Image (spheres, rainbow, N blue to C red):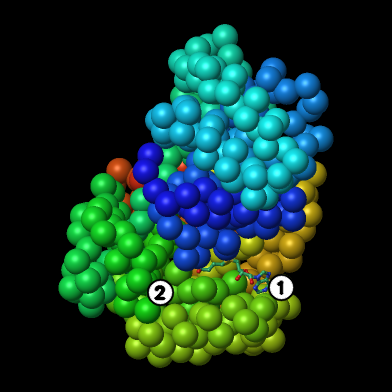
Amino acid sequence: MSGSPDAREHAARVLSRVDAAGAHAARLLGDATPMTRELVLGVLRWQRTLDHLLAPRLRQPLATLDPPVRVVLRLGLYEALRLRTPAPVAVAEAVRVAKVLAPPASGLVNAVLRRAVESSWPPDDDEALALGLRFSHPDWLVERWRALLGDGVTRAALAADQLAAPLTVLASPLSEAALQDAGCELAPHPWSPLVRVVTGNAAAAVRVIAAGGAYALDATAALVATLAPAVAGRAIDLAAAPGGKLLSLAGVGAALALVGADRHLGRVLMLRRNLQARHIPDVVLAMDGSRPALRPGSFDLVIVDAPCSGTGTLRRHPEIRWRLRRSQLGELVAAQRRLASGASELVAPGGYLLYSTCSIEPEENEQVVEALDLEAVQVRAHLPAGVPCIERAGGGVIIPPTAHGDGFSVHLSRRLAG
Ligand SMILES: C[S@@+](CC[C@H](N)C(=O)[O-])C[C@H]1O[C@@H](n2cnc3c(N)ncnc32)[C@H](O)[C@@H]1O
């Protein structure tokens, strides 16, 4: 792979912060070059497999090395084995970066990498190897998904998590014109009429998006708009920032007066900017959705797009898989239940609650909705044809991660009229 040497150093600095300080890679990659982005996200996606190949070449456990040394080793091996950078170039570049970030360890990086680049990458169809090793996921998550999704869907989901996510934008004549004027190429999405895929000149598209001319949104996140066409009146998204769900609803011309709320003031202001940039009349509130300061029963559609573990978004946020602990799901669920309960109070008789997360774990989804005193509505019938999904007992769906969309869960329920 060609590219400026600084891209590698930048990648190593970002990876060190993710490794040592628990930083979110996507937040640090805002203005990164495509090569830095590829290196950072690729190393995080393949971390377990890379560590498996590095371990036998080291005299001490990888976990005991300083973070910059650890990440430079992963970076060099990733380049040599996954990006087909000639091995001597990958090793020399890793040593050069080590001399900047961890000078005393540059000799170790050289010695370890020279031998590690001789390794063979574990074939993804070698059934003798654990799935979690072949697709670089923790075993506990793989076992959870096998029980939930079955072997075939799990394998496809694991493979999808290892792909770079395409850039997709909300479909609208204005933003498509802005993108085309900037020299971007767009294609229809395989199953969603709500988004377009940027297939050429992504760098220009990123500039148009940053200037407010288009809105980047994953295809599954936009699906919320297909679930509300029959509802008219007032709608509120109780956890609305940065605004993707409300923008999707406005984009399909839903007959709804839209209100957006979020607990964090900074995010409310971001939401407001995003709505104003698209001339959507905005009513935005800074409010804790679990204790909404609004009249009960005053909305025909209440959306809760709850903060979650993000297990559907591992291709965009690969480090989540290494951080998430089973025990954390319980903590998240308590907050999700409070939010869903606050939301259900606002649903008018005959109105709907749409609960979604970008997690595919039942505890964060169907088990939250089941506890509410509302009537379940079948979701599948409202989705565009071709959306891969697994129907759950309560009428909601899990959409597993695929090459065409993040993993997502959606449940729709209704307060009976009268
Ligand atoms: C998954 S994001 C929402 C994404 C948004 N619906 C969209 O489509 O762009 C979750 C949001 O929930 C907000 N949040 C977390 N706890 C909240 C609470 N108790 N009340 C309101 N918002 C909350 C966070 O600030 C965050 O913006």
Q: Give the number of the disc on residue 210.
A: 2
Q: How far separated are the C-alphas under marks 2 and 1?
A: 32 Å
Q: Nearer the viewer, residue 375 or 401?
A: 401
191 up-or-down from 54: above or below:
below
Which quarter of the image is occupied by the C terminus? Answer: bottom right
Residue type at the position of mark 2: Ala
In this orientation, does residue 394 appear?
Answer: no
* Callout 2 crowding tier (Cα within 10 Å): few <14, some 14–19, many ≥20: few
Q: Secondary structure at mark 2?
A: helix
- The residue tagged 1 is 290
Residue at the spot 73% in from the left edge and 23% down from the top edge: 58
Residue at the spot 73% in from the left edge and 66% down from the top edge: 338
415 up-or-down from 387: above or below:
below
295 up-or-down from 122: above or below:
below
Say which quarter of the image contains residue 209: bottom left
In this orientation, does residue 339 appear?
Answer: yes
Residue type at the position of mark 1: Ser
x, y percent for residue 71: 64, 41
Which quarter of the image is occupied by the N terminus? Answer: top left
- Asked whether, in this view, residue 365 is left or right of residue 200, the answer is right
